[in-house]
Amino acid sequence: MSIHKEGRVLLVVLLIILSVINIMVYLGFPDQPMIFRLTLGITIVLFLLVLQFFRNPKVITSVNDRHVVAPADGKVVVIEETTEAEYLKDKRIQISIFMSPVNVHVNRMPVKGVVEFFKYHAGKYLVAWHPKSSTENERTTVVIKTPKGVSVLMRQIAGALARRIKWYVKEGENFEQGQEFGFIKFGSRVDVFLPLTAKVKVNIGQKTKGGMTVLAELD
């Protein structure tokens, strides 16, 4: 288990701030040790909560050209047929994964391939499960084409708490299945758009592990 690079500076700054708060309380209330102990306990819990959010466990993906693996830890909240209007402009199976603040927020490639399209969209911060969040919230769109020519589209979507999306992709880059391509802070969602011929292997409400859970099989 390691700490993700997106959280290292924040954690150092937070540790300094919380340490200063504890020192001030200790010096300001020398005759009331209970106040110091209470403050110390609260700040330790707060630091540990933020620390766990940025954990980055090692993931071993069982590579399979037919499999579409989950791009994130979380819970499946949408499985439906829809029209992808931004880039693919055809009917697709949409699978959406909601990431709560306690999930690992590393985003991983569901398939192997080359990035054929990428775009960042500024937007709102509706709650991630809101039906309009995938078209109105701050988001990115990533399309990766597999070696067999199948295009898979993903969206990183910021939620009400997630105010920063990070991505590590550019058009023309090659990615392996399960390789990290982004990170979203503090609660968010990832949508995956697959061909109608894909065989879905998950159910609504099912928990997923990024880079490990098989969402679907491609022809």
Image (cartoon, rainbow, N blue to C red):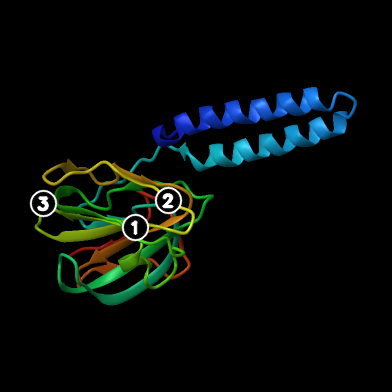
Disc 3 packing (10 Å; few <14; some 14–19; many ≥20) = few
Residue 159: give x, y in percent of width and height: 44, 58
Tell me the residue at 43%/63% (across/down).
128
- What residue sits right under mark 1 in the picture? 138
The front one of 191 and 211 is: 191
Which amino acid type is marked by label 2? Answer: Arg
Label 1 crowding class (10 Å Cα cut-off): few <14, some 14-19, many 20+? many
Residue type for callout 3: Pro
Residue occupying the point 88% across, 29% down: 32
In the image, residue 149 lies at what x, y percent? 9, 58
Name the quadrant of the C terminus.
Answer: bottom left
* Numbered disc 2: secondary structure: loop
> Could you tell me residue 9's position as x and y percent?
46, 29
Taking 59 as reference, is 150 above or below it?
Answer: below
Q: Position of residue 85 (x, y in %)?
A: 19, 71
Q: Earlier in the sequence, mark 3 or mark 2?
A: 3
Q: Identify the residue at horizontal 61%, vertical 36% (top origin).
A: 47
Residue matched to label 2 = 163
* Residue 169 visible, this angle: yes
Left or right placement of residue 178 versus residue 45 in this view: left
Q: Are marks 3 and 2 in contact (CB under 8 Å)?
A: no
Q: Say which residue label 3 marks.
A: 147
Q: What is the residue that sits farthest to the front in this orientation?
A: 28
Q: How many marks?
A: 3
* Residue 141 to residue 5: above or below: below
